[in-house]
Amino acid sequence: MLARRLPGILPPLDARETLEVTRIHSAAGLLAPGTLVRVRPFRAPHHSASAAALIGNARLRPGEVSLAHRGVLFMDELPEFTRPALEGLRMPLEERRVHLARAHGAVTLPADCIVVAAMNPCPCGMAGDPDRECTCTSVRRTAYLGRLSGPLLDRFDLRVEAPRAAAHAAPGEASEAVAGRVSAARSILAAGPPELEPGAVALLDRAVARLHLSGRGAERARRVAGTIAALAACERAGEEHMAEALSFRGPAG
């Protein structure tokens, strides 16, 4: 549900983005002639989708990661996807594009989307639950989590544990309210990422040493700290922003 709300807090597609998305969907045969895509895409492939369905097939047609360009790609039950499909996400997550080379030729497709994934803490889904006991063996749980490689997880900017929601919890903020803050933050970031204060730099250096963050992980922490600062309308990213960014890296760093 949270993933489906993401397009609603992002700004509308501008003219250039509209043409980009329309061309991709037209190439995939998903649009009638003369039709424009005017809303940000939301794609949610089933976990049985193949690597070709996600990245692109032998006929050089766009896969789900390109169909989600300028929008959101939601992958539910992430460990249930095949290993080739998951590892095929490395380039899109890093370079925001997909290069397909097949017998029919080669093509580079844009894939600049927000990838959101969800998974259970274990096969039965009860690990860490305060009210119900996990029935998985340690071997089964380890095998389940081992389906996701470290390099793939390292490419996700945020890793958040979501506890079970209460049935009658109070509603959260409306998308319109969040969208206003997102728009303001994007305007700040358009001028360049906020500069890190000395305290934030020192905290990141300590985290790299103690948590063994990779170079990619450290760079993503910098970017997340800058985004948090922009959402708070701060011109510089302070130690508190870096601490929050590092809390999203998770134990795997």
Image (spheres, helix red, strand yellow):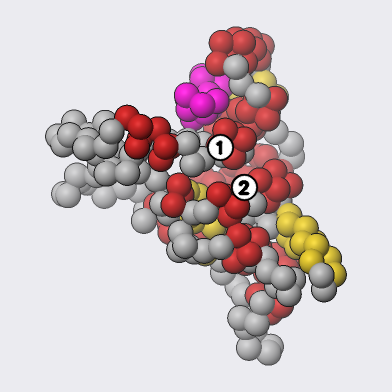
Q: Which residue is mark 2?
A: 87
10 Å crowding of disc 2: few (<14), some (14-19), many (20+) = some
Do the residues bearing badges 2 and 1 touch, measured as CB atoms within 8 Å?
Answer: yes
Q: Residue at x 28, y 33 (%)?
A: 137
Q: Is residue 247 above or below residue 135?
A: above
Instruction: Tell whether 219 sits left or right of 76.
Output: right
Disc 2 marks a residue whose amino acid type is: Glu
The answer for how far apart the CA atoms under marks 2 and 1 are is 8 Å
- Of helix, strand and loop, which one carries label 1? loop
Percent across and percent down for residue 96 are 71, 51
Q: Residue furthest right?
A: 105
Is residue 15 visible in the rendered image? The answer is no
Disc 1 marks a residue whose amino acid type is: Ser
Percent across and percent down for residue 44 are 48, 63
Q: Is residue 53 above or below residue 77?
A: below
10 Å crowding of disc 1: few (<14), some (14-19), many (20+) = few
Q: Residue at x 36, y 56 (%)?
A: 1
Q: Residue at x 64, y 52 (%)?
A: 88
Which label was assigned to residue 192? none
- Of helix, strand and loop, which one carries label 2? helix
- Whichever of labels 2 and 1 marks the residue nearer the N terminus, that label is 2
Is residue 184 visible in the rendered image? The answer is yes
Percent across and percent down for residue 24 are 70, 72
Numbered range of the magenta stretch? 239-253
Q: Which residue is mark 1?
A: 149
Q: Residue at x 68, y 30 (%)?
A: 216
Q: Is residue 247 magenta?
A: yes
